[in-house]
Amino acid sequence: MSEIVLDVRDLEAGYEPGVPIVRGASITVAKGEIVVVLGPNGAGKSSFIKAIAGLVPITGGTVFLDGKDITAAPAHTMVRLGLAFVPQTENIFPLMSVEDNLKVACGILERREIPGRIEEMYSAFPDLVRQRRTPAGNLSGGQRQMLAVARALIVHPKVLVLDEPSAGLSPKFVSMVFEMLANIRKSGVTILLVEQNAKAALAIGDRAYVLVEGKDRHESIASELWNDPVVAELYLGQRPSQAGKGGTA
Amino acid sequence: MSLQFVVDGLLTGSMIGLGAIGVTLTYSILRFSNFAHGDFMAWGTYATLAVVSAIGATFGKVAPIAPLSFGWPLIVALAIGMAFTALLALLLDKVLFSRLRSQGQAIIVVMASFGASMALRSLLEFTFTSRPTYFSRAIQIAMPVGFGIRITPDQIALLLLTAVLVLGVHLLMTRTQTGRSMQALSQNAALARIVGIDVASVVRVTWVIGGGLACVAGVMIGILVQIRPFMGFDMLLPMFAAAILGGIGSIPGAVLGGLIIGLAEASAVQLIGAEWRAAVSFIILMAVLFVRPIGLFGVRER
């Protein structure tokens, strides 16, 4: 395996002290990989990924990014450390224009670098160009997701972390979002994502973890996870494909 | 009828508007109604007055800049007073508001600001007595400018100052990274942190802008009317009315709201009598909110 970018060990996290939602989950993400975290509803997937991004208090374990301990780093320092997070919902500033949504995320870039970087995002996401002056709240669901991803990528993150990027999108946009993520990986960005839509996520992922009751219970090559009987059992007797149909929860 | 109410209204409106900018920023970014904002005005004005007196004691009598009623000491003192008021706002946030804010209940912060307001006002009365005082006792001759309107050089200077400050704050909010960060924080605090915005530093900038402008508004009242410990508290309701009328979070809205209320008050004094002054602005406020509940420049949340 190549160089490890993100190394999460025995992570424990939760909003209230003494009530952990994540209870000892470990994963690694290697440079250039797409790693998918799956799991049944209420498995703590979302809290797990938010804890890594500094948004849920961590009560145990460690998070290393590029060998650096970022366990205690406040959320607003994550982009500077190289971790860019895309939340599941409310991931754009609705009253600001598309361009201001991109600009506001450029705080860590050199001032003279910003205009060029914005143009690069427009060429990567041509749908956004025509809407550059539009309030982001007026965009369609798929375009919002593009803007949220563009805003995360604009700061050259070492790892892009996404919480259910396909949630709430119509099927047409779901395939568009996963296609977009596959293309982003081709450009050399490492990706960690949590998904309900197991089938689509596994189709683009390299490796996958199954999270159950706040613990990592299974790890495998993405393409093999599909037919693994252990995984079906972890999904409480459901096939991951069936669990995936639940879609947006 | 005389059109004099236009000048009077614009002046009152400027004072209200400058104060309302701070109210609207605190409300949209820190998510609470700061009842102590009026007392920031009064403290800023007394601080400015203290510096003017200190300069007077050190340099002797300084001739005013003709044709204005004040000289360079007041301009220097205003800058110092603004810095002082900004620091006062930051201090109050550190010892009081930020602690309560972290507990997450907005109404507690609002009540605390009410308490802070009374404490600050009482301290002023204790220190400076409640007797009104003035920056200058010189009487300015108002120049006729046509249509029955008279205006003094001080009034012209202060209207220009208001225009410059409002334009400056508007550009700051819309054209700079600091301003975009403030907008971002007011729209979605969690996402603001995710995109790398240090919430604590944006909160500090908000207090500095609100405090500084409150001081300017207070000094305007001091120059044109008089200086009293209650001068800011008495402005509180018109300031909130202006902020709500303009649409919470909107800088141009707060200023326009201030001007509308100032003009309405001034015309009411002329047309139906001074005792209706306060009532008229609130009738206008209610009428606007019936038609457009989010205020003139307000935007629906999502």
Image (cartoon, coloured by chain):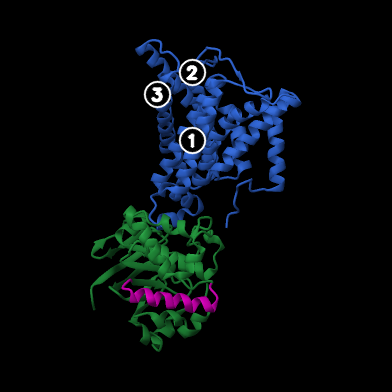
Chain colours: A green, B blue
Q: CA distance from mark 1 to mark 3?
A: 16 Å
- Mark nearest the camera among 2 and 1 is 1
Name the one closer to the observer, A197 or B212. Answer: B212
Element type where label 2 sits in the image: helix
Q: Let me know if marks 1 and 3 both belong to one chain.
A: yes
**Residue A196 shows up from this direction:** no
Label 1's element? helix
Residue B300, how many percent across, how many down? 60, 53
Chain hosting mark 3: B
Residue drawn where x is 60% and y is 37% of the image: B240
- In the picture of the structure, the residue carrying the numbered disc 1 is B165
Residue carrying label 2:
B126
Q: Quadrant of the C terminus of chain B?
A: bottom right
Query: Looking at the picture, do discs 2 and 3 lie on one chain?
Result: yes
Looking at the image, which residue sits at the far top? Answer: B60
Cα separation, mark 2 vs mark 3, equals 26 Å
Could you tell whether B185 is left or right of B140 in the image? left
Q: Main secondary structure of the magenta part?
A: helix
In which image quadrant can residue A219 be found?
bottom left
Residue B233 to residue A246: above or below: above
In which chain is the residue bearing label 1? B
Give the x, y percent position of residue B25: 51, 42
Question: In the image, what residue type sits under mark 3?
Answer: Val
Quadrant of the image for the N terminus of chain B? top right
Q: Magenta residues, as a range?
A: A169-189
Residue under the point 45% across and 44% down: B172
- Sequence-first disc among 2 and 3: 3
- Label 2 and label 1 in one chain: yes
- Residue A152 lies left or right of residue B264; in this view the side is left
| Rendered residue at 40%/32% (across/down) | B87
- Compared to residue A200, the image places residue A135 above or below, namely above
